Image: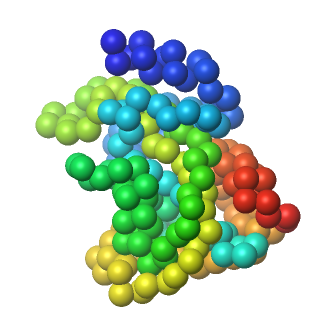
Amino acid sequence: MQQEQLTVYLQRQQHISEEEALWHLLRMQLNCYLIQELPPLELVTSVRCIVFQEEQVLVVKNPFNVHIQPGGRREQGESLEESLRRELLEETGWEIQQPSLLGVKHFHHITPRPENYQHPYPDFLQLVYCARATLYRPEAKEVDGFELGADFLPVAEVKQLTLTANERIFLETALQTLGICD
């Protein structure tokens, strides 16, 4: 039933990109959508956000690359917005105001389910939001986190970075949503 519910939901959304993703040794098909309605929440494992300060975008560095969608896993009992705010604070030190929902990233595992895998399989979703930064709290950042740092860069510079297709489309949608001219 869950697979059928997901299929029906995704058919109603605006498909924007398709690519392959690799996470550790897990290969996945990644399809992204602009959305107007929330998906089945039991499949939403993570939340992400494109964060702006005036006309600059928060760019996050990790050991492998840079990206513009910081965020992470939901914890039991948290609302989507609570998860988003906590994850952004832990990864970047930034608080945000009024997040706007942009889209969903649908991951479908291509590789067999690993033994003791604790997450939804074969499909899971990540929601993508956009928001403006409000307060920087460096003491709230995780010291031993995966992220190495985060800096605001002008939109024109961000567009010159090596971004995925979905990051580019979600960035353009976020600029329109927040009324930012680039």
Q: Judge whether 37 appears above or below 22 on screen.
A: above
Residue drawn at x 56%, y 58% as measured from the top left: 99
Residue drawn at x 62%, y 46% as measured from the top left: 102
> Which residue ends up furthest to the right in the rendered image?
181
Residue 159, position as x, y percentages in the image: 76, 62
> Which residue ends up furthest to the front in the rendered image?
98
What number of labels is visible?
A: 0
Q: Judge whether 180 appears above or below 169 on screen.
A: below
Q: Is residue 123 visible?
A: yes
Residue 125, position as x, y percentages in the image: 43, 37
Which quadrant would the C terminus be assigned to in this image?
Answer: bottom right
Residue drawn at x 36%, y 87% as measured from the top left: 139
Residue drawn at x 53%, y 64% as measured from the top left: 65
> Which residue ends up furthest to the left in the rendered image?
116
Colour convention: rainbow
In this view, the residue in front, 153 or 89, is 89
In this view, the residue in front, 173 or 111, is 173
> Viewed as shown, does residue 24 lie left or right of 64?
left
Residue 1, position as x, y percentages in the image: 33, 12
Q: Is residue 160 visible?
A: no
In this view, the residue in front, 64 or 172, is 172
Residue 62, position as x, y percentages in the image: 46, 68
Q: Judge whether 164 appears above or below 140 on screen.
A: above
